[in-house]
DNA sequence: GATTGTTGGTTCAATGAGCGAACCGACTGG
DNA sequence: CCAGTCGGTTCGCTCATTGAACCAACAATC
């Protein structure tokens, strides 16, 4: 919220959190990072976000230590943005938000999250009902649900149709 | 948010959720509702939110079925806003967000959430470590933590210094 | 019965953030 | 040499947010 003044006066960790991740688009950028999106252009086409806004969000998230900018080739110089531990710690929030949206708004099963080790669908707290443990983020597998469109327009969405683990880089085939 | 166009094209329950509760101030209004704030003026002084924005948010949340407008006296006609079941279902999201903010940003214990029945501090998923159950929202007690200021300026914050259960109306003493 | 205060708003001008389109520099591949 | 890609920046336009002022319905006080 643009560091809008007023949240600061709230003595509240929720307000502090919103100060950092509460702006428009920010949480969707982070969601995409969990799905393995790492590059400027992939965020761009997948989110349909204005370029200037994306640049601003990536910079802010990097400054906050939620994303890390990492050089992955030298010539031409190219960077990718990956979640830090602090960013990964947002998973329970995203999970709770997605579950609420699914149950109270969309009522569709768009994506299913499973324990990669055993294939069991995760409980609301990213727990594996079969193994009785809380599943770490890298061990979560995302698979398309029955209500997800099978032929999306953009290449990133198409790449995300393949089952994959969270955080693993998505493989976008060049147009 | 603002029903900005683009979230709509995302096939994602997180995006849908953000469409509804992602605007500036919205989640803080909901947080206050959990804390027992119910009246226009109490939201106003506690949040320091512009009047027009508060009116707009309350109306939107009511339209979405997250808050319910309820007449509590006839003359003069006065309404209060209380959380519906759909609103109460946002508790895990708020809890996750607050925990993240506390651990990665503020690093202070501002408020402590306990199981009212046994007094045990809640785990990250609103579970009671002592009883081994997930604690329902009305059974959660909020008490001020060691790092919370003891003499806040506004009367609502002052009223919230008393331990109380979530959702129970806060008793603000008239100025 | 006139005045003041409380509650819950609406209206207004000024500012700031988001938007889409255009542009740009560094490089690659043909 | 030319076209194309990637990761941005710049530029107007529009729309949302802000803070201050105003307002209507009533209650309590003088």
Image: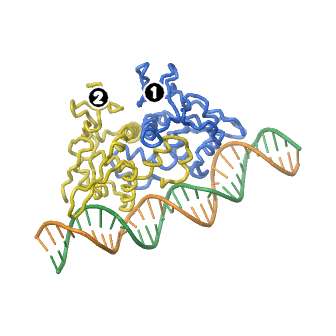
Chain colours: A yellow, B blue, C orange, D green
Residue B155 position, x and y percent, is 66, 39
Question: Which chain is disc 2 placed on?
Answer: A
Instruction: Name the mark on residue A128.
Output: 2
Q: CA distance from mark 1 to mark 2?
A: 21 Å
Q: Is residue B69 left or right of residue B173?
A: left
Residue A164 position, x and y percent, is 22, 42
Task: Say which of marks 1 and 2 sits in front.
Answer: 1
Assign a secondary structure to mark 2.
Answer: strand
Image quadrant containing the C terminus of chain B: top right
**Residue carrying label 1:** B122
Relative height, residue B123 to residue B100 (above, below):
above
Residue B94 position, x and y percent, is 46, 38
> Which one is in front, B39 or A105?
B39
Dot 1 and dot 2 within a common chain: no
Number of numbered tags placed on the structure image: 2
Q: Is residue C18 left or right of residue B67?
A: left
Instruction: Name the mark on residue A106.
Output: none
> Which one is in front, A6 or A129?
A6
Which residue is at 22% across, 32% downward?
A119
């Amino acid at each position: 919220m643009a560091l809008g003044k007023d949240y600061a006066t709230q003595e509240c960790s929720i307000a502090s959190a919103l100060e950092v991740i509460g702006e428009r688009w920010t949480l969707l950028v982070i969601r995409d990072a969990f799905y393995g999106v790492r590059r400027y252009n992939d965020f761009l086409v997948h989110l349909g976000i204005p370029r200037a806004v994306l640049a601003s969000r990536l910079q802010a998230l990097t400054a906050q230590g939620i994303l890390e900018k990492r050089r992955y080739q030298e010539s031409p110089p190219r960077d990718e943005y990956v979640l830090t531990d602090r960013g990964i710690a947002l998973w329970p929030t995203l999970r709770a938000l997605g579950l609420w949206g699914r149950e109270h708004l969309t009522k569709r099963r768009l994506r299913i999250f499973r324990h990669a080790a055993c294939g069991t669908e995760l409980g609301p707290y990213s727990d594996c009902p079969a193994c009785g443990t809380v599943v770490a983020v890298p061990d979560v597998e995302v698979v398309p649900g029955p209500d997800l469109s099978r032929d999306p327009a953009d290449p990133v969405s198409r790449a995300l149709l393949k089952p994959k683990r969270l955080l693993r880089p998505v493989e976008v085939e060049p147009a």
